[in-house]
């Protein structure tokens, strides 16, 4: 199916989000759609998928002009959209989510076994193991992402739009996804692939379209450009790539956070000391225990072992509020589910940390709330028309800045960053990296949980590598030989390549 979008315009009140954009997708083509957060990528795709009505412009399918009224109409036309923000129902099981609004039935009764069987067949094709009868609310974020992808594959589409589909996936799961995409491509299925991960775009896509401030600024073939070229087209300026080459170490002798023998669901006997001004990264593949360790240090789940903040113990069952009041805060993964309060304004989202840790008055003071927002807007360059708008009115990158500003207002000593640049464009990523370095320089102790080596390499002083829930290695930026923080060593220890020799030592 040939897709042609011509002169598409989308307005939100006085704001023009998409400005006369043309986009063509040929049968069996994988198109990369690039741009910073807020550039108009998702808005343009929502117009194609029937979620938004363009103010102007035309859409053609195989030369025939069409008006796509809603998502169900788009699905009937063969267009599927896998959104960046998961749209699953936690109170339904897996196959019920996959067949939502497209259930199969016999004699007026739902064919649950048949739907579960077909779901299992899709999972087998994807080489993943998910119980179709499991409740979606019980799944990990990566498993939910795979269910979203499986739902699009279940009903054979001519065009599949993927908005940051690999955010929560492991390297192996991403490889499997690309195998499936190439198989479908050979069958004539087309893809529009939105991602901020340059290596993925260059690996799986053939052509690119770049949006900036709602305008199409460049298009062409990936084989004719470099990652640096793509980045500069997205942000509209040259990016200094050596900003982090000579990163300084700001650590002091004072220990801000000490962990000894931490154990819990998915992790065992983890110990480390984090000093003021120091940045330690924690990494590992999916299932390594990285996510659960982050939650435990934040007080979100139970754990055994000793955790001390500035020399004072925090009991295993202390809970999040007690951790917050002791100066341990977290910028969490999965922004929509764990970070933002979707029903509240930008004002309230940025003030929530202060209310829980330092607020001592009976009534909220609007002037103080406005001052908190203004302070963090200047510090973090938050782009917002008015802070009274709901937090969901902001782009993903600006939402992440609001979450960060929330915790900066508490003046906490220990900051946990769990996948801090998840689903964020290159320019905003660099802003957050520089901010983390400035926080370290000011004496904050920082623990970063991440699976991206370029991110770890830019900001970390050392890196704890987990494998099967245990510390497999500690790599250091200034280390020598086996202890050096290099991509080769990180992958070697993340995959447990040394585990057999360690077990027999």
Image (cartoon, rainbow, N blue to C red):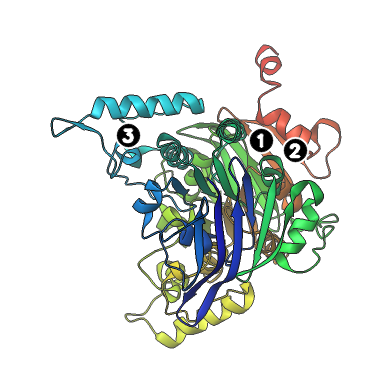
Under circle 3, the secondary element is: helix
| Quarter of the image that includes the C terminus | top right
Q: Residues within 10 Å of mark 1 (few under 14, many from 20)?
A: many
The residue to which callout 1 is attached is 465
Quarter of the image holding residue 270? top right
Q: Which badge, 2 or 1, is on the more N-terminal residue?
A: 1
Disc 3 versus disc 1: nearer the observer: 3
**Residue 171 placement (x, y as % from top left):** 62, 34
Residue found at x 81% / y 50%: 224
How many numbered markers are drawn?
A: 3
Q: Which badge, 2 or 3, is on the more N-terminal residue?
A: 3
Q: As displayed, is residue 442 above or below residue 419?
A: below
In this orientation, which residue lies closer to the viewer: 101 or 403?
101
Q: As displayed, is residue 360 above or below residue 492?
A: below
**Residue 400 placement (x, y as % from top left):** 54, 62
The residue to which callout 2 is attached is 475
Q: Residues within 10 Å of mark 3 (few under 14, many from 20)?
A: many
Q: Is residue 327 visible?
A: no
Is 32 left, or right, of 240 in this rendering? Answer: left
The answer to whether the residue labelled 2 contacts the one labelled 1, judged by CB atoms less than 8 Å apart, is: yes
Q: Is residue 366 visible?
A: yes
In this orientation, which residue lies closer to the viewer: 84 or 10?
10
**How far apart in space, not on screen, are marks 2 and 3 (Cα)?**
42 Å
**How far apart in space, not on screen, are marks 2 and 1 (Cα)?**
8 Å
Under circle 2, the secondary element is: strand
Q: Which badge, 3 or 1, is on the more N-terminal residue?
A: 3
Q: As displayed, is residue 76 above or below residue 123?
A: below
The residue to which callout 3 is attached is 95
Is 194 left, or right, of 239 in this rendering? Answer: left
Residue found at x 47% / y 84%: 370
Q: As displayed, is residue 415 above or below residue 264?
A: below
């Amino acid at each position: 199916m040939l897709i042609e979008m011509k002169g598409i315009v989308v307005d939100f009140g006085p704001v023009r989000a998409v400005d006369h954009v043309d986009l063509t997708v040929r049968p069996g083509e994988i198109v990369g759609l690039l741009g910073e957060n807020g550039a108009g990528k998702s808005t343009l795709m929502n117009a194609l998928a029937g979620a938004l009505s363009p103010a102007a412009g035309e859409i053609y399918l195989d030369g025939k002009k069409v008006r796509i009224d809603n998502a169900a109409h788009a699905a009937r036309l063969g267009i599927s959209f896998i959104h960046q923000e998961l749209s699953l129902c936690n109170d339904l099981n897996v196959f019920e989510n996959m067949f939502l609004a497209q259930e199969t039935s016999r004699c007026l009764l739902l064919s649950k076994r048949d739907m579960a069987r077909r779901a299992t067949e899709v999972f087998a094709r994807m080489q993943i193991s998910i119980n179709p009868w499991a409740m979606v609310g019980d799944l990990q974020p990566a498993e939910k992402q795979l269910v979203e992808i499986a739902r699009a594959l279940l009903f054979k589409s001519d065009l599949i739009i993927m908005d940051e589909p690999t955010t929560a996936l492991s390297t192996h799961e991403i490889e499997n996804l690309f195998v499936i995409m190439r198989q479908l491509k050979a069958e004539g299925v087309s893809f529009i692939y939105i991602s901020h991960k340059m290596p993925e775009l260059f690996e799986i896509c053939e052509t690119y379209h770049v949006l900036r401030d709602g305008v199409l600024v460049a298009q062409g073939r990936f084989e004719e450009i470099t990652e640096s070229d793509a980045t500069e087209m997205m942000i509209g300026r040259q990016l200094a790539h050596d900003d982090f080459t000579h990163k300084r170490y700001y650590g002091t002798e004072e220990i801000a956070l000490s962990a000894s023998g931490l154990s819990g669901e998915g992790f065992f006997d983890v110990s480390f000391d984090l000093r003021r001004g120091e940045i330690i990264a924690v990494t590992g593949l999916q299932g390594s225990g990285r996510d659960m360790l982050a939650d435990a240090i934040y007080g979100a789940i139970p754990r055994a072992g000793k955790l001390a903040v500035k020399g004072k113990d925090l009991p295993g069952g202390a809970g999040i509020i007690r951790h917050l009041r002791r100066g341990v805060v977290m910028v969490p993964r999965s922004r929509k589910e764990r970070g933002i309060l979707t029903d509240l304004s930008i004002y309230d989202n940025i003030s929530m940390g202060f209310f829980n840790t330092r607020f001592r008055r009976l009534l909220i003071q609007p002037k103080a709330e406005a001052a908190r927002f203004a302070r963090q807007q200047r510090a973090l360059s938050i782009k917002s028309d008015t802070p009274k708008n709901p937090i969901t009115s902001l782009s993903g990158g600006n939402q992440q800045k609001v979450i960060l500003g929330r915790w900066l207002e508490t003046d906490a000593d220990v900051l946990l960053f769990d996948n801090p640049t998840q689903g964020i464009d290159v320019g905003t990523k660099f802003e957050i990296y520089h901010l983390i370095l400035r926080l370290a320089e000011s004496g904050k102790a920082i623990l970063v949980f991440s699976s991206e080596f370029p991110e770890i390499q830019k900001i970390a002083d050392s890196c704890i590598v987990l494998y099967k829930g245990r510390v497999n290695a500690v790599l250091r930026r200034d280390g020598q030989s086996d202890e050096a923080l290099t991509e080769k060593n990180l992958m070697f220890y993340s995959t447990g390549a040394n585990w057999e020799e360690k077990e027999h030592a």
